[in-house]
Amino acid sequence: MLNRRESEIMRAVYGLCEGKESCLVSVYEILSMLPGRRGYTAEAVEEILHSLELDDYFDLVSSERKGERMYVITLHRNGEAYRRDAQQMRRGIVFRIALSAAGAVVAFLVGLLLRTIFS
């Protein structure tokens, strides 16, 4: 299970690869796709990229191009399935919220029924 920062970076990497198996990106391209209010730095993004590599989401190879560090990212099975896993997680959360709301309505109706019976 990814935390919020890892999930945002994985979403950005997945968007940059756009269905391709591998892509060439820089840290600044990833930073441009992240929400600004979280205050990401290039070092933090690189650290999270390396942790995602350890979690087997993708293979990360660094290189230099015109003095800028570039990464060749090759998605693995976990990385390719990221979007599907995120959708399933959202569906699960919506289901839990709907189940909680239905439980609250049923509890309210049972309370009204008991009040009318014992009044």
Image (cartoon, rainbow, N blue to C red):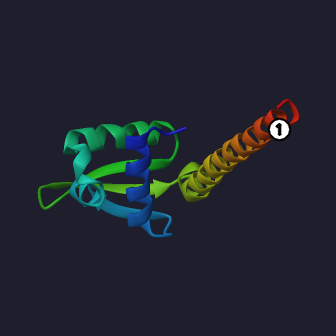
Up/down of 39 relative to 118, above or below: below
The residue closer to the viewer here, 78 or 101, is: 101
- Taking the image as shown, residue 98 lies to the left or right of residue 11, namely right
> Residue, x 83% and y 39% (percent of image)?
113
The picture places residue 49, in percent across and down from the top left corner, at: 36, 43
Q: Residue at label 1? A: 116
- Taking the image as shown, residue 90 lies to the left or right of residue 63, namely right
At label 1, counting other C-alpha atoms closer than 10 Å, the crowd grade (few under 14, some 14-19, many 20 or more) is few
Quadrant where the C terminus is found in the figure: top right
Quarter of the image for residue 12 reads bottom left
Q: Secondary structure at mark 1?
A: helix
The picture places residue 98, in percent across and down from the top left corner, at: 67, 50
Amino acid type of the residue that numbered disc 1 sits on in the rendered structure: Thr
Quadrant where the N terminus is found in the figure: top right
> Residue, x 83% and y 38% (percent of image)?
116
> Residue, x 44% and y 42% (percent of image)?
53
- Taking the image as shown, residue 74 lies to the left or right of residue 1, namely left
